[in-house]
Image (tube, rainbow, N blue to C red):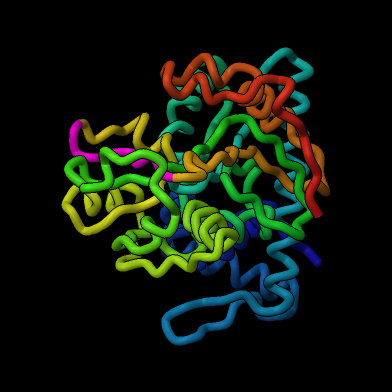
Amino acid sequence: MHVTWRQLKVFETVARLGSFTRAAEELFLAQPTVSMQVKQLAEAVDQPLFEQTGRRIQLTEVGDALYATCREMFDTWARFEMTAADLKGLKRGRLRLACVTTAKYFVPRLLGPFCDRYPGIDVRLEVANRDAVVERLARNEDDLYIMGTPPQHFDIALHPFLENALVVIAPAGHPLAGEKRIPLARIAEEKLLLRERGSGTRMAAERHFRDHGFVLKPRMELATNEAIKHAVAGGLGISVLSQLALTLEPMQGQLAILDVEGFPLKRHWYVVHPGKRDLSVVAQTFFDYLRDEAGALLPPDTRAALLSPGEAHDARVR
Protein backbone atom coordinates (compact mmCIF):
# COMPACT_ATOMS: atom_id res chain seq x y z
CA MET A 1 0.00 0.00 0.00
CA HIS A 2 1.68 3.20 -1.22
CA VAL A 3 0.36 6.37 0.41
CA THR A 4 1.89 9.75 1.06
CA TRP A 5 1.91 11.98 4.11
CA ARG A 6 0.20 14.66 2.04
CA GLN A 7 -2.65 12.33 1.09
CA LEU A 8 -3.18 11.43 4.72
CA LYS A 9 -3.15 15.07 5.78
CA VAL A 10 -5.70 16.02 3.11
CA PHE A 11 -7.91 13.07 4.05
CA GLU A 12 -7.72 13.91 7.78
CA THR A 13 -8.74 17.51 7.11
CA VAL A 14 -11.73 16.48 4.97
CA ALA A 15 -12.82 13.93 7.58
CA ARG A 16 -12.44 16.40 10.46
CA LEU A 17 -14.33 19.21 8.73
CA GLY A 18 -16.82 17.01 6.89
CA SER A 19 -16.37 19.04 3.73
CA PHE A 20 -14.05 19.02 0.70
CA THR A 21 -14.62 22.76 0.24
CA ARG A 22 -13.73 23.69 3.82
CA ALA A 23 -10.72 21.35 3.71
CA ALA A 24 -9.47 23.08 0.56
CA GLU A 25 -9.81 26.46 2.28
CA GLU A 26 -7.93 25.33 5.40
CA LEU A 27 -5.12 23.73 3.36
CA PHE A 28 -4.94 26.57 0.80
CA LEU A 29 -5.49 24.08 -2.03
CA ALA A 30 -7.86 23.98 -4.98
CA GLN A 31 -10.86 21.73 -4.36
CA PRO A 32 -10.04 19.47 -7.37
CA THR A 33 -6.61 18.89 -5.81
CA VAL A 34 -8.20 17.85 -2.53
CA SER A 35 -10.60 15.50 -4.32
CA MET A 36 -7.76 13.95 -6.31
CA GLN A 37 -5.64 13.33 -3.21
CA VAL A 38 -8.53 11.59 -1.46
CA LYS A 39 -9.33 9.57 -4.60
CA GLN A 40 -5.73 8.37 -4.89
CA LEU A 41 -5.70 7.41 -1.21
CA ALA A 42 -8.95 5.45 -1.61
CA GLU A 43 -7.44 3.63 -4.60
CA ALA A 44 -4.39 2.73 -2.51
CA VAL A 45 -6.61 1.42 0.29
CA ASP A 46 -8.80 -0.26 -2.35
CA GLN A 47 -11.96 0.76 -0.49
CA PRO A 48 -14.14 3.89 -0.50
CA LEU A 49 -13.33 6.27 2.37
CA PHE A 50 -16.44 8.47 2.15
CA GLU A 51 -20.04 7.96 1.17
CA GLN A 52 -22.53 10.57 0.03
CA THR A 53 -25.80 11.04 1.92
CA GLY A 54 -27.78 13.76 0.22
CA ARG A 55 -25.50 16.79 0.24
CA ARG A 56 -23.45 15.50 3.15
CA ILE A 57 -20.44 13.21 3.20
CA GLN A 58 -19.67 10.77 5.96
CA LEU A 59 -16.90 8.29 6.62
CA THR A 60 -17.25 4.66 5.69
CA GLU A 61 -16.20 2.04 8.20
CA VAL A 62 -12.69 1.82 6.76
CA GLY A 63 -12.61 5.62 6.45
CA ASP A 64 -13.43 5.96 10.13
CA ALA A 65 -10.61 3.53 11.01
CA LEU A 66 -8.20 5.43 8.78
CA TYR A 67 -9.22 8.75 10.35
CA ALA A 68 -8.43 7.39 13.84
CA THR A 69 -5.08 6.12 12.54
CA CYS A 70 -4.26 9.50 11.01
CA ARG A 71 -5.04 11.29 14.26
CA GLU A 72 -2.74 8.96 16.17
CA MET A 73 0.05 9.39 13.62
CA PHE A 74 -0.18 13.18 13.54
CA ASP A 75 -0.41 13.40 17.32
CA THR A 76 2.66 11.19 17.69
CA TRP A 77 4.63 13.27 15.22
CA ALA A 78 3.52 16.53 16.86
CA ARG A 79 4.66 15.21 20.22
CA PHE A 80 8.06 14.39 18.75
CA GLU A 81 8.37 17.89 17.29
CA MET A 82 7.46 19.42 20.66
CA THR A 83 9.91 17.16 22.50
CA ALA A 84 12.70 17.98 20.04
CA ALA A 85 12.03 21.71 20.45
CA ASP A 86 11.94 21.35 24.25
CA LEU A 87 15.33 19.60 24.22
CA LYS A 88 16.70 22.63 22.37
CA GLY A 89 15.35 24.88 25.12
CA LEU A 90 12.37 26.04 23.05
CA LYS A 91 8.65 25.82 23.62
CA ARG A 92 7.10 25.21 20.22
CA GLY A 93 4.13 23.32 18.91
CA ARG A 94 0.35 23.46 18.91
CA LEU A 95 -2.01 23.59 21.87
CA ARG A 96 -5.54 22.42 21.15
CA LEU A 97 -7.85 23.75 23.83
CA ALA A 98 -11.63 23.43 24.14
CA CYS A 99 -13.82 25.13 26.72
CA VAL A 100 -17.52 25.45 27.49
CA THR A 101 -19.23 28.73 26.68
CA THR A 102 -19.22 30.17 30.21
CA ALA A 103 -15.44 29.70 30.44
CA LYS A 104 -15.00 32.16 27.57
CA TYR A 105 -15.23 34.93 30.18
CA PHE A 106 -11.82 34.09 31.60
CA VAL A 107 -9.96 31.68 29.28
CA PRO A 108 -8.99 34.34 26.68
CA ARG A 109 -7.69 36.53 29.55
CA LEU A 110 -5.38 33.67 30.51
CA LEU A 111 -4.30 32.83 26.98
CA GLY A 112 -3.03 36.32 26.15
CA PRO A 113 -0.11 36.36 28.62
CA PHE A 114 0.60 32.68 27.89
CA CYS A 115 0.94 33.38 24.16
CA ASP A 116 3.16 36.38 24.89
CA ARG A 117 5.41 34.22 27.04
CA TYR A 118 5.55 31.36 24.51
CA PRO A 119 5.26 32.94 21.03
CA GLY A 120 6.32 29.66 19.41
CA ILE A 121 3.15 27.91 20.62
CA ASP A 122 0.20 28.04 18.24
CA VAL A 123 -3.05 27.94 20.22
CA ARG A 124 -6.34 26.73 18.76
CA LEU A 125 -9.31 27.46 21.04
CA GLU A 126 -12.73 25.92 20.49
CA VAL A 127 -15.67 27.35 22.46
CA ALA A 128 -18.86 25.29 22.50
CA ASN A 129 -21.67 24.16 24.78
CA ARG A 130 -20.99 21.35 27.21
CA ASP A 131 -22.45 18.57 25.05
CA ALA A 132 -20.21 19.55 22.13
CA VAL A 133 -17.13 19.75 24.38
CA VAL A 134 -17.89 16.31 25.82
CA GLU A 135 -18.18 14.95 22.26
CA ARG A 136 -14.78 16.44 21.44
CA LEU A 137 -13.37 14.82 24.60
CA ALA A 138 -14.84 11.46 23.59
CA ARG A 139 -13.18 11.77 20.17
CA ASN A 140 -9.91 12.92 21.77
CA GLU A 141 -9.81 15.99 19.52
CA ASP A 142 -8.00 18.38 21.87
CA ASP A 143 -5.17 18.41 24.37
CA LEU A 144 -7.03 20.02 27.28
CA TYR A 145 -10.64 20.82 28.12
CA ILE A 146 -12.01 23.41 30.55
CA MET A 147 -15.47 22.75 31.95
CA GLY A 148 -17.49 23.03 35.12
CA THR A 149 -19.21 19.63 34.96
CA PRO A 150 -16.83 16.89 33.75
CA PRO A 151 -18.57 13.79 32.39
CA GLN A 152 -18.87 10.69 34.51
CA HIS A 153 -17.70 7.25 33.34
CA PHE A 154 -14.96 8.68 31.09
CA ASP A 155 -11.33 7.72 31.60
CA ILE A 156 -10.16 11.25 32.33
CA ALA A 157 -7.81 13.12 34.62
CA LEU A 158 -9.16 16.36 36.05
CA HIS A 159 -7.82 19.18 38.16
CA PRO A 160 -9.99 21.85 39.85
CA PHE A 161 -8.34 25.25 39.64
CA LEU A 162 -11.04 27.89 40.10
CA GLU A 163 -14.27 28.22 42.02
CA ASN A 164 -17.39 28.40 39.88
CA ALA A 165 -20.10 29.81 42.13
CA LEU A 166 -23.65 29.83 40.76
CA VAL A 167 -25.97 32.65 41.82
CA VAL A 168 -29.64 33.49 41.31
CA ILE A 169 -30.15 36.72 39.40
CA ALA A 170 -33.20 38.92 38.87
CA PRO A 171 -33.95 42.36 37.39
CA ALA A 172 -32.66 45.13 39.63
CA GLY A 173 -36.20 46.21 40.56
CA HIS A 174 -37.55 42.73 41.28
CA PRO A 175 -39.65 42.40 44.50
CA LEU A 176 -37.27 39.72 45.83
CA ALA A 177 -34.17 41.86 45.34
CA GLY A 178 -34.25 43.23 48.90
CA GLU A 179 -35.29 40.06 50.72
CA LYS A 180 -33.01 37.86 52.85
CA ARG A 181 -32.68 34.06 52.80
CA ILE A 182 -35.33 33.52 50.16
CA PRO A 183 -36.62 29.91 50.30
CA LEU A 184 -36.00 27.66 47.31
CA ALA A 185 -39.75 27.08 47.11
CA ARG A 186 -40.24 30.76 46.35
CA ILE A 187 -37.67 30.69 43.57
CA ALA A 188 -39.22 27.54 42.06
CA GLU A 189 -42.49 29.47 41.66
CA GLU A 190 -40.85 32.26 39.64
CA LYS A 191 -40.68 32.53 35.86
CA LEU A 192 -37.36 30.82 35.24
CA LEU A 193 -34.99 31.38 32.35
CA LEU A 194 -32.46 28.57 31.96
CA ARG A 195 -29.65 27.58 29.64
CA GLU A 196 -30.25 24.85 27.08
CA ARG A 197 -30.41 21.18 28.09
CA GLY A 198 -26.92 19.76 28.49
CA SER A 199 -25.54 22.99 29.93
CA GLY A 200 -23.42 22.38 33.03
CA THR A 201 -24.97 25.38 34.78
CA ARG A 202 -28.47 24.09 34.14
CA MET A 203 -27.56 20.55 35.22
CA ALA A 204 -26.15 21.83 38.52
CA ALA A 205 -29.17 24.07 39.18
CA GLU A 206 -31.69 21.33 38.39
CA ARG A 207 -29.80 18.84 40.57
CA HIS A 208 -29.73 21.26 43.50
CA PHE A 209 -33.46 21.99 43.34
CA ARG A 210 -34.28 18.32 42.75
CA ASP A 211 -32.29 17.34 45.85
CA HIS A 212 -34.58 19.65 47.82
CA GLY A 213 -37.79 18.31 46.30
CA PHE A 214 -38.40 20.85 43.53
CA VAL A 215 -38.57 20.38 39.76
CA LEU A 216 -37.60 23.42 37.72
CA LYS A 217 -39.95 24.26 34.86
CA PRO A 218 -38.31 26.92 32.71
CA ARG A 219 -40.39 29.58 31.06
CA MET A 220 -37.73 29.93 28.39
CA GLU A 221 -34.50 28.19 27.32
CA LEU A 222 -31.66 30.33 25.99
CA ALA A 223 -28.38 29.24 24.45
CA THR A 224 -25.97 31.87 25.83
CA ASN A 225 -25.25 33.65 29.09
CA GLU A 226 -25.54 36.99 27.28
CA ALA A 227 -29.07 36.15 26.18
CA ILE A 228 -29.94 35.08 29.74
CA LYS A 229 -28.62 38.32 31.25
CA HIS A 230 -30.44 40.55 28.78
CA ALA A 231 -33.67 38.56 29.14
CA VAL A 232 -33.51 38.88 32.92
CA ALA A 233 -32.71 42.58 32.69
CA GLY A 234 -35.70 42.92 30.37
CA GLY A 235 -38.01 41.51 33.03
CA LEU A 236 -38.75 38.14 31.42
CA GLY A 237 -37.86 36.19 34.58
CA ILE A 238 -35.03 35.16 36.89
CA SER A 239 -32.17 32.74 36.30
CA VAL A 240 -29.17 30.87 37.69
CA LEU A 241 -25.78 31.85 36.26
CA SER A 242 -22.10 31.53 37.01
CA GLN A 243 -20.95 34.51 39.06
CA LEU A 244 -18.02 34.85 36.66
CA ALA A 245 -20.47 35.80 33.91
CA LEU A 246 -21.45 38.78 36.04
CA THR A 247 -18.05 39.65 37.51
CA LEU A 248 -16.13 39.75 34.24
CA GLU A 249 -18.91 41.19 32.08
CA PRO A 250 -21.24 43.08 34.44
CA MET A 251 -24.47 44.80 33.45
CA GLN A 252 -24.20 47.71 35.85
CA GLY A 253 -27.43 48.58 37.64
CA GLN A 254 -29.57 46.18 35.60
CA LEU A 255 -29.28 42.94 37.55
CA ALA A 256 -29.48 41.92 41.21
CA ILE A 257 -28.06 38.80 42.86
CA LEU A 258 -30.75 37.35 45.12
CA ASP A 259 -30.04 36.08 48.64
CA VAL A 260 -31.38 32.54 48.24
CA GLU A 261 -31.01 29.67 50.71
CA GLY A 262 -28.23 27.35 49.56
CA PHE A 263 -26.72 29.91 47.19
CA PRO A 264 -24.14 30.74 45.99
CA LEU A 265 -23.94 27.15 44.83
CA LYS A 266 -20.25 26.24 45.07
CA ARG A 267 -18.77 24.36 42.15
CA HIS A 268 -15.39 24.36 40.42
CA TRP A 269 -13.81 24.89 37.04
CA TYR A 270 -11.72 21.91 35.95
CA VAL A 271 -8.96 21.41 33.44
CA VAL A 272 -9.49 17.95 31.97
CA HIS A 273 -7.57 15.63 29.70
CA PRO A 274 -7.93 11.98 28.65
CA GLY A 275 -6.49 9.74 31.31
CA LYS A 276 -5.16 7.18 28.85
CA ARG A 277 -2.34 9.34 27.53
CA ASP A 278 0.39 11.62 28.84
CA LEU A 279 0.27 15.31 28.08
CA SER A 280 2.49 16.71 25.36
CA VAL A 281 5.25 19.12 26.35
CA VAL A 282 3.13 22.08 25.22
CA ALA A 283 -0.06 20.87 26.93
CA GLN A 284 1.87 20.22 30.15
CA THR A 285 3.31 23.73 29.93
CA PHE A 286 -0.15 25.28 29.73
CA PHE A 287 -1.49 22.93 32.41
CA ASP A 288 1.26 24.05 34.82
CA TYR A 289 0.71 27.70 33.89
CA LEU A 290 -3.02 27.44 34.48
CA ARG A 291 -2.61 25.68 37.81
CA ASP A 292 0.21 27.79 39.22
CA GLU A 293 -0.08 31.28 37.74
CA ALA A 294 -3.55 31.92 36.38
CA GLY A 295 -4.86 33.55 39.57
CA ALA A 296 -2.49 36.49 39.34
CA LEU A 297 -3.83 37.32 35.87
CA LEU A 298 -7.50 37.54 36.81
CA PRO A 299 -9.27 40.64 38.17
CA PRO A 300 -9.19 40.95 42.01
CA ASP A 301 -12.84 39.91 42.46
CA THR A 302 -12.20 36.75 40.48
CA ARG A 303 -8.69 36.14 41.80
CA ALA A 304 -10.07 35.40 45.25
CA ALA A 305 -11.87 32.40 43.79
CA LEU A 306 -8.65 30.70 42.73
CA LEU A 307 -8.20 27.51 44.69
CA SER A 308 -5.25 27.34 47.03
CA PRO A 309 -2.75 24.49 46.55
CA GLY A 310 -4.24 22.78 49.59
CA GLU A 311 -7.73 22.82 48.12
CA ALA A 312 -6.82 21.85 44.58
CA HIS A 313 -6.07 18.26 43.77
CA ASP A 314 -5.71 16.01 40.78
CA ALA A 315 -8.30 13.30 40.26
CA ARG A 316 -8.99 10.42 37.93
CA VAL A 317 -12.53 9.63 36.80
CA ARG A 318 -13.55 6.44 35.04
Quarter of the image where one finds residue 300: top left
Camera-side residue: 9 or 182?
182
Residue 286 shows in this picture: yes
Q: Would you say residue 137 sits in the magenta stretch?
A: no
Q: Position of residue 228 (x, y in %)?
A: 30, 52
User: What is the quadrant of residue 253 in the picture?
Assistant: top left
SS assignment for the magenta stretch, majority: loop
Q: Position of residue 201 (x, y in %)?
A: 49, 52
Position of residue 14 relative to residue 225, above or below, is below
The residue sitting at 74% across, 34% down in the picture is 280
Residues shaded magenta = 253-260
- Quarter holding the N terminus? bottom right
The reply, left or right, for residue 196 in relation to residue 269 is left
Image location of residue 264, percent across then percent down: 48, 39
Residue at coordinates 51% horizontally, 59% vertically from top-left?
209
| Snapshot quadrant of residue 87 | top right
Q: Residue at x 18, y 54 (%)?
A: 235
User: For this rendering, which residue is in front, 197 or 7?
Assistant: 197
| Residue 100 as seen in the image, left or right of residue 49 | left
Quarter of the picture holding the C terminus: bottom right
Residue 10 visible in rendering: no
**Numbered-mark total:** 0
Residue 102 sits above or below residue 314 on the image: below
**Residue 259 belongs to magenta span:** yes
Residue that extends furthest to the bottom in the rendered view of this protein: 54
Q: Is residue 192 above or below residue 248?
A: below
Instruction: Name the residue located 69 percent from the left edge and 63 percent from the top edge.
Output: 67
